[in-house]
Image (cartoon, grey):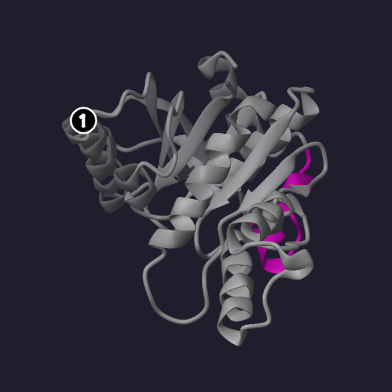
Amino acid sequence: MGYKIAVAGKGGTGKTSLTGLLIDYLVKKGEEPILAVDADANANLNEVLGEELEVTIGEIKEEINKAEASGSGFPGGMTKADYMKLRLNTAVIEGNGYDMLVMGRTQGEGCYCYVNGLLKSQLDILTKNYKYFIIDNEAGMEHLSRGTVRDINTLLLISDCSTRGIQAAGRIRKLIDELKLKIPQVYLIVNRAPQGELNEGIKAEIEKQGLELIGVVPMDPMIYEYDSSGKPLVKLPEDAVSRQAIREIIAKLGL
C-alpha cells in the first residue's frame, strides 16, 4: 500500500502551491512512482506543476451521462459500468516523473457526491500501484468527512498567518477526532509568514487549537511573481525560500 500524504486547510492559504512543491521535491529525489491527486472541484494543481489538464473524473461522468441520455449507447456494445471503468482508467495522466488524477467537477450546480465516490473508488484501486500518494484536498473538510481519502499516513494542515486560518485548521483537527479517523501524523504548516516568523498571537492560537506545528514557510515574493506571470511553481529556483522551507519540513517528516 502506498504512503498517503493529504493536504488540507482553508481556501487561499497556498495549500496547492505547497502540495506542488512537495511533489516536485519527491520527484527530484527519485521517490517514484508517485500519484498526484487533485481532489478539489476547482482543479489547479496541474497549473502549479506545469501540466496540461487532459481529462477529469467530473468530465468523464458528464460524457457518460450525455451518452446515456441520448440513447446512442456505448462503444463496442459495452455496458455503462464497463465503459465507465475503461474511461476512468484513462483519467490517470502521465506527468513529469509522476502520474496525476484530477477529480474536477460536473457541469452546473449540484452535489459532487457521485464524483467524490468515483474518486474514492479509483484511489482504492490504485493503492498498490504507487509508492506515494500526494492528495490536494478542496478547501474545507468534505473529503475527510465523506471518507473519500482513506488510510492517510500524514495529514498536513495548511494555514496562513491569520487567526481564521489557524482556527480552520483546528476545526479539521477536531473533526478527525470526532470521526475517530486513525491518521498517525497530523501537522500544521503556517504559510506566507513575514520573514518566516510567527507573532505571539498566532503562537497562542496554535496552542489553543491543539495543533502540532512542523514548519513555517516564509512569504516568498517569487511565488507571487510566478503566479502573476502564469509560470509553474516547479520552475522556482532551488534557493527560493519556499523550497528551502519545504525541504526542512520533509526532513522532519522523515520521508
State the SS at label 1. helix
Q: Residue at x 60, y 45 (%)?
A: 37
The quarter of the displayed image where residue 127 is located: top right
Q: Position of residue 47 (x, y in %)?
A: 69, 59
Which percent across, then down, holds residue 85?
Answer: 64, 52
Q: Nearer the viewer, residue 123 or 41?
A: 123
Q: Nearer the viewer, residue 34 or 110?
A: 110
Residue 34 in the image, given as x and y percentages of width and height: 70, 32
Residue at the farthest top position: 254
Note whether 211 is above or below 54 in the view shown: above
Q: Residue 55 lies in what quarter of the image? A: bottom right
Q: Residue at x 79, y 23 (%)?
A: 30
Magenta stretch, overall SS:
helix
Residue 241 visible from this viewpoint: no
The quarter in which the N terminus is drawn is: top right
Left or right side of 19 for 29: right
Is 199 within the magenta?
no
Residue denoted by label 1: 177
Q: Which residues are magenta?
A: 223-237
